[in-house]
Amino acid sequence: MTSRYGMLEEEKVFKDPVHRYIHVRDELIWELIGTKEFQRLRRIRQLGTTFLTFHGAEHTRFNHSLGVYEIMRRIVENMEKREHFDPEERLVCLSSALLHDVGHGPFSHSFEKVFHTDHERWSREIILGDTEINSVLRGMSDDFPKKVADVIAKTYQNKLVVSLISSQIDADRMDYLLRDAFYTGVSYGNFDMERILRVMRPKEDQAVFKHSGMHAVEDYIMSRYQMYWQVYFHPVTRSAEVILSKILHRAKHLFEQNYSFMDKPKHFESLFSGKITLEDYVKLDESVILYYFQEWQEEKDPILSDLCQRFMDRRLFKYVECDPSVQMKVWPELIQLFGKIGFDPNYYLVIDSSSDLPYDFYRPGEEEERLPIHLLMPNGDLRELSRESDVVEAISGKKRTDHKLYFPQDVLEDDKTFPIEKKQILKLLTSQEG
Ligand code: ZN
């Protein structure tokens, strides 16, 4: 090994509201944090548009990435106390934890859908391409960047390391549940992480948990279940997300029609034309996007300017629960009525679906195979969690899906121009609710 890194002369410490302190002792980690691609994560919020629902949710991918690193650091430290841990493998763990979200773009979820990009692919490119991060990682050894990229892509040969970052109980999820609960201010995301880390034991391909810590693991699963429905899929956040993606769709459409923007959207051009390079990608962050949204409020195109005003002033779409089978029947009529009263249904009438599977036992061959969580029994046997825990059994393998129909409040408001149409829309929209 020809690494140019050692230990820092003096430990660096970050103050963190979730883990209290984040400790950095390795030169490698300190240098990675200082790269421009990592610093960019300060300008990307962890929860996208959630700040429009929970105003505290202004925390960033930067905070979260440091948090995942800190949890990984503690996991590795605990493992080292029990058995020999290869020092290079230790740095693979810490670097992958720190960099696991480095490819995220601004408002990732909407962006990825509209532009068909994928943050995992960008993480890989940032780690392996011509970047500051790549040159820091290469200071370890020539094949070190590839090892880190493989862990994030889940193809790394050491499956234990992969499972510590992506499985049903991993450093990533533990950090985001605690952090998102803290910053949103909700009371249900909490669980005893210290206890989980204390009862965690490495076992071949994944970590298992001593039976005595089962209730802490149960709590973690329930907290994930609660956070999905109370925070991540919150209908108001989804509404903001719907408007955001419609703005991007509209701007892309106008670009394709050679519309002349008052302010040329140069940061978007390569995205719109589907030819975005790594160099362009790392220049995108949420301050850039919000700058354009601010500008586009004044555009001549009425749909683009209206949607941007709604987003900036937080005049979000309303919603009703909808049943896809009922919706199919009234859909053509709704589309026609929306057109008639001057709301293009392509932008102002949207169905959005959310679904989540809180925990699953092992189902080999299924689309997304999930490694189950195993408990280590006092006699040394392993038992799958839902066989021991009644609480977890109750929600295991149960997928919940929820559909909502979004539309602007104005389509219902009384006015003199379309009284009959508006009454009819109201009737059709409310017929959606069961
Ligand atoms: Zn993450």
Image (tube, rainbow, N blue to C red):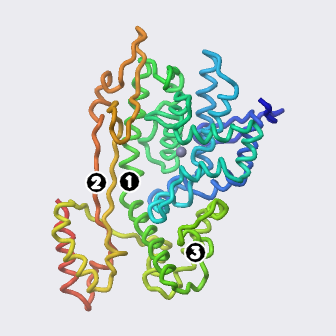
* Front residue of 187 and 129: 129
Q: Are marks 2 and 1 in contact (CB under 8 Å)?
A: yes
Which label belongs to residue 402?
2
Q: How many C-alpha atoms fall within 10 Å of the one at disc 2: few (<14), some, or many (≥20)?
A: some
Q: Is residue 321 above or below residue 423?
A: above
Residue drawn at x 63%, y 39% as measured from the top left: 148
Q: Position of residue 16 (x, y in %)?
A: 63, 42
SS under mark 3: helix
Q: Position of residue 362 (x, y in %)?
A: 34, 30
SS under mark 1: loop
Is the C-beta of the residue carrying label 2 under 8 Å from the nearest atom of ligand 1?
no
**Which badge, 2 or 1, is on the more N-terminal residue?**
1
* Front residue of 421 and 20: 421
Please give the residue where the numbered disc 3 appears in the rendered image.
Answer: 292
* Front residue of 186 and 164: 164
- Could you tell me how far apart the alpha carbons at marks 2 and 3 are, in whole angstroms? 32 Å
Q: Position of residue 402 (x, y in %)?
A: 28, 54
**Extreme residue toward the top, this view:** 379
